[in-house]
Image: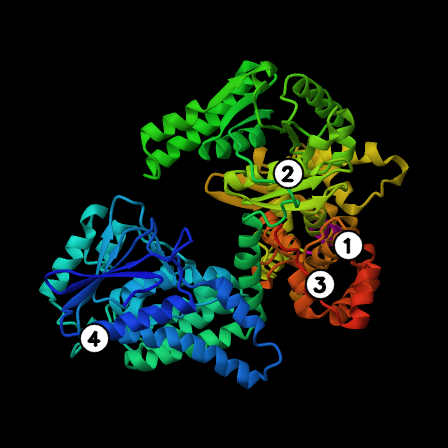
Amino acid sequence: MSYTHFKFELDGDGIALITFDSPNVSMNVLSASVMAELGQIVDKIGSDDAIKGAVITSGKKAFCAGADLSELGSGMMDLKGLSEEEAKQKLFDTAFRLNSQLRALETCGKPVAAAINGLALGGGFEVTLACHYRVMANDTGAKLGLPEALVGVLPGGGGTQRLPRLVGVMNAAPVMLQGKQLDADTAKQQGVVHEVAPVSEIVAKAKELVKANPLGSKQPWDQDKFKIPGGGPFHPAGMQIFGGASPMLLKETYGNYPAQRYILSCVYEGLQVPIDAGLRIESRYFTKLLMRPESRNMIRSLFLSKQSLDKGSRRPAGQEKSEIKKIGVIGAGFMGAGITTVSAQAGIEVVLIDVNQEGADKGKQHAVDFFAKGVKRGKITEDKAKKLADLITATTDYGALKDVDLVVEAVFENSELKAEITKKAEAVMPKGAIFGSNTSTIPISSLAKASERPDNFIGIHFFSPVEKMNLVELIVGEKTGDLAVSRAIDFVGKIKKTPIVVADTRGFYANRCVMRYIEQGMYLLTEGVKPALIENAAKMAGMPVGPLSLQDEVAIDLGYKVLQQTKKDLGDQFEDTPNAQVIEKMYELGRYGRKNGKGFYVYEEGGKRLWDDLDQFAPNGELLPADQQPSVGEIKDRILYAQAIEAARTMAEGIVEDPREADVGSILGWGFAPYTGGVISFIDTVGTEKFVTRADELAKKYGKPFEVPQLLRDMAAKKETFYARFAPKKAA
C-alpha cells in the first residue's frame, strides 16, 4: 500500500522504516489526512506478523512542526451555527482522535522508535513521546518542545500526560508552561531521549533499540508498579511542586492566560489516574480551552494572521518577489547598527554609512559583538561569525551605495537632516533601488518631498531593540509605488521579521497607539496616582512593562526630540498635554531613561527602582490619599481602552485596512496584552456595543483620549465586529 505523506520500507530484519515526508511543503505538520494515514500504518504494524517493529523519521530537515493550526482555525469557523454542546462535542471528538491514534501506536504490541533528525515541536514531539524509544540527532540543531501555550492552546496529543510521566513534573513544567525547548544533550540528560548521535546514525541506532526492545514493547507508564518520577500530586515531593506552581503561575500571568492554568490542571488531575483516563482529561481541557475567546484570538493573531503576513499577503497585485542581496544603512547609531546586524545575519551584504569613520566602525562592532555572543552560546561557529561580519562595510563614502537594492536611513528625528541624506544617497543609488526611512513619527509624504523618486520612497519603521523585536511597519506615502512596497516586504521577509503595511500619518500606526499607553501613565501620574500602582496595574492588564518603564526604555530624550519636531511641524495646531509637560520637565532634569541610568526609574547595579521624587508631578506635589486611589480595574480599563480606541481611529481613517495587521502589529510592536489577540480582537471580544458604552463612561471622567470615532458608534449600533466589517484581504 502506498501513502501520500509517508514512505514505508521493510528491511530484512522485519523493521519498518516510516519516513514522514508530506509533498509540496517545506515542513511536516499533523493534518487530518496525515493522522488518517498514520492510523492506517499503525494498524498495519500491529496486524502484520512480518513486521517486528518500526522506526519513524522524517524526510525533511525538521521532524515535524506540530499540528496544522491552519486546519484548526478553519475547524473553529465550522462551529458557527452549532449549539454550545454540539460545538464542544465536535471539538472533543477532533482532539481525542489524535490521542486515540497515538495511544494505538504505543499499544500496538510492537516496539516503535523515533529517529529525530531535526525540530520536533508540539504534535511532532508528542508523536515521538508515543514511541517506545527516541534517538535524537546532535549535529542538526534539533530541538524538542511543546510551544502550544504560547499561542493560547495546550498540548492535545498526550503531551501533558506522557512528558511528566517520563521525566517528572519539575522537568516537564518549563516545556509545557513556558514553551522551553530542549536540545539533544538536555533531552538525553533528562531522560526524554534514549540516545543522541550524528544524524547519519540515528536510524541505525533506533533500529538497534527496536531489535533489543528492553521495554518489551510497553511504555514505562504501562509497566507494572510504575511510579511518576519525582512523585505524583499526593506524594510529599509532588505536593510541594503543585503547591508552589499555582501561585508562581499567577504571579507570572496575572490569571490572563487560561492555557497555562488548564495545562496545570491537566497534569494535576491526569497523574492521579491511568494514562487512558488522563488522555481523556487532556482532551476535555483542550476542548474547554478552545471554547474560550483568549485561545481563539491568540491562535488567529499569533499564528494564522502572523503566518499570512510573513508569507507576504500584503504584496501588491502584479508584483513579483525579488531577491534583496545588498543594502545600505545610513546612520550607525543604535538603530542603524541593529538593522545592519539582522541584515548581515540574513546573508545580506551591508554598506553602513556614518558621518565619520569612527561612528561607522562602532556600528559594525555592534554587529561583530552580537555574532560573537552567538558563538559563545553555541548558535553559530567562529567561521560563520567572521563571514557574517565580512558582509558589512563600514564607511563614510556614499559612493558605496552604487549597487544596492535598498537603502534604510536611520538617523535621528530631524526632517532637515533626513532630507539632506536622501539627496546624497539618491545621487549615487541605482535608479531602481528603494529608499526607506526608519522614522518613527515624521510623515513619509513630508520626507519624500526631498526625493527625486517619491514612488520608490517608503517608510521602514523598525522597533528597538532591532535584534529582538519582530515587527517592521511599512509606511506608504502619497506617492509610494507598488514596487517599493513589494521590495520592502521582501526585505523584511528575508530578515525574518513580520511586516505590516500602513498608510501615512504622524506616528503611523504603532507609535500612535503606544503613545496613548504611555500618555495614560503620565496622566495618572499627574492625577496623583501612586507610580507603583500605575506600573503594576498595567502589568496586570497584560502589558509586558508599565508605561513609565516603557518610556524609560525608548528614551525620554528621544521622546523630547520627537515632541519638539511635532511642535515645529504642527505650530498652532499642537495641543499641550500632561504627557508633554512631564517629558519636558524630565528632560530639563537630565533624566533620559535607562540610557543614562535615571528616568522614571533609578537604575542601579542589580536592578531598578521607581524614582522617589515622582510625586512632584502630582497636584500640589502630593499623591492622592490611599482611600482616593483608583481601583486596579479602573486603571486597567484606561490603559487598554485608550490604546484600542486609537487603533479604531486608525482603521476609521484608513491608516490600517486589515484587522489582522492591527492585531499582529499591536502584539509584536509594543506588546499589547497578547491574551486578547490584539487591540482589534479586544474590541470585538468585548463587543462593540459594550465597548462604546464603557468608553463613554471613561470619556466623561477622563476626557478626549476616550472619545470613540464615529465608525465605532456605527458598528456598535449594528453590533458589528471589525473582523466581519473589514474582511482580511487575501494574498495577491
The residue tagged with tag 1: helix, strand or loop? helix
The residue tagged with tag 2: helix, strand or loop? strand
Amino acid at dot 3: Phe
Residue 722: mark: 3
The residue tagged with tag 4: helix, strand or loop? helix
Label 3 and label 2: CA atoms lie apart by 25 Å
Q: Of 159 and 585, which appears nearest the observer?
A: 159
Amino acid at dot 2: His
The vertical placement of 100 against 356, above or below, is: below
571 sits to left or right of 348: right
The reply to whether dot 4 and dot 3 touch (C-beta < 8 Å) is: no
Find disc 2 in the rendering and name its residue. 461
The reply to whether dot 4 and dot 2 touch (C-beta < 8 Å) is: no
Q: Which of marks 3 and 2 is nearer the N terminus?
A: 2
Find disc 1 in the rendering and name its residue. 649
Q: Earlier in the sequence, mark 2 or mark 1?
A: 2
The residue lying furthest to the front in this view is 1
Residue 46: mark: 4
Q: Look at discs 4 and 3 and give the one toward the viewer.
A: 4
Q: Earlier in the sequence, mark 4 or mark 3?
A: 4
Few, some or many C-alpha atoms within 10 Å of disc 3 (few <14, some 14-19, many ≥20)? many
